Amino acid sequence: MLEPGRAKPVPTPETQHFWDGTKTGELRLQRCGECSKVYFPPRPFCPECGSRNVSAFKASGKAILYSYVIHHRPVPGFKPPYAIAVVELAEGPRMMTNIVDCEQTPEALQLDMPLEVVFEPMDDTITLPLFRPAKG
């Protein structure tokens, strides 16, 4: 359950497909039709070659823990301690997120540990993609 007071993302025309996906339980990434680069965050052009020939697709939702820091100070919307993490998605891109359903300790948060996406609604319009240790 998300803590009250957490800042709410504001979708833009370039990111709306991503937020529409999270609302339906899909993690959507984009792929370039010219160079095949898969990337995140969403944008209307490929960060590799600049092409605007890009399309969105449903990602697997699988990742590994690439890096993290455990934050211990109170911040609106977060109950310390909590992990601010960078995960590497199975499709290649990295994204910043939070790790849930896991002790927020260095012993529990092992680099390269398998993760899976879980979706937490903020309200009727925004659902956040968070990650937890993979179940299987």
Image (tube, rainbow, N blue to C red):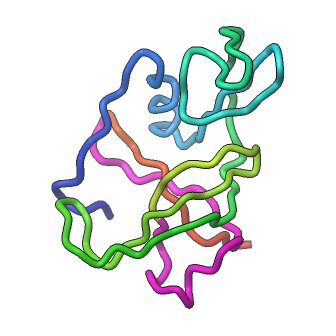
Residue 133 position, x and y percent, is 61, 72
Q: Does the magenta stretch include residue 102?
A: yes
Q: Nearer the viewer, residue 19 or 84?
A: 84
**On the rendered structure, is 14 left or right of 89?**
left
Residue at (59, 41) in percent of width and height:
27
Quadrant where the N terminus sits is: bottom left
Residue 65: image quadrant is bottom right
Residue 88: image quadrant is bottom right
Residue at (64, 64) in percent of width and height:
66
**On the rendered structure, is 82 left or right of 108?**
left
Residue 58 position, x and y percent, is 68, 35
Q: Is residue 14 magenta?
A: no
Q: Magenta segment range?
A: 99-124
Residue at (68, 58) in percent of width and height:
63
Position of 109 relative to 97 (above/below)? below
Most frequent secondary structure within the magenta stretch = loop
**On the rendered structure, is 41 left or right of 35?**
left
Position of 48 relative to 133 (above/below)? above
